[in-house]
Image (cartoon, grey):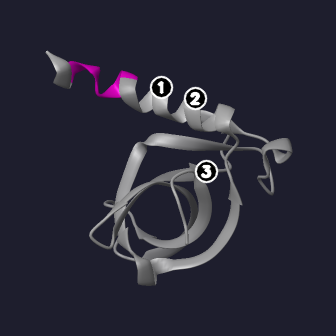
Amino acid sequence: MLKPGDVILAKVQFTDINEIKIRPCVILFEDCNNIVIAGITSNTNMKGISLTTKDGAIKNSVIKTNYIFTISNIMIEKYLFSLTSQKKKELFNDLKNKLKDLNN
């Protein structure tokens, strides 16, 4: 059973292209068989939460908290690793900061 903070490979369709690609991503939460994920890129120049090989990534990467998708279970290809509790806190705080204006 997958859980929040698990890094997976999943089929994702980006808004700017018509094709579906298999991409690494981190599970944020699951509700009614819908899984909300954040994309991960190996382009370390992008903004987001850094992931290193010490964290479990195959290569240094970035969790892109501005790339949020909803997928179904059948789109998950493979489990890769789980984020550390420190990385989960970092991810939570980044998302909370992005959503802070909803609290006004």
Q: Is residue 45 visible?
A: no
The residue nearer to you, when weighing 81 against 23, is 81
- Where, quadrant-wise, is the C terminus in this rendering? top left
What is the span of residues highlighted in magenta in the rendered image?
97-101
Residue 31's image quarter?
bottom left
**Sooner in the amino-acid sequence: mark 3 or mark 1:** 3
Task: Estimate how packed mark 1 is, as few (under 14), some (14 to 19) or many (20 or more) residues with alpha carbons within 10 Å.
Answer: few
Q: Is residue 77 left or right of residue 75?
A: right
Three-letter amino acid code at the position of disc 2: Glu
Distance CA(mark 3)–CA(mark 1): 19 Å
| Residue 3 vertical placement versus 95 (above, below) | below
Q: Hey, what amino acid is under mark 3?
A: Thr
Name the secondary structure under disc 2.
helix
Q: Secondary structure beneath disc 3?
A: strand
Marks 2/1 in contact by CB < 8 Å: the verdict is yes
Q: Residue at x 57, y 30 (%)?
A: 89
How many labels sit on residues? 3
Q: Which residue is mark 2?
A: 90
Work out whether residue 51 can be spotted: yes
Is there a contact, CB below 8 Å, between mark 3 and mark 1? no
Disc 3 marks which residue? 41
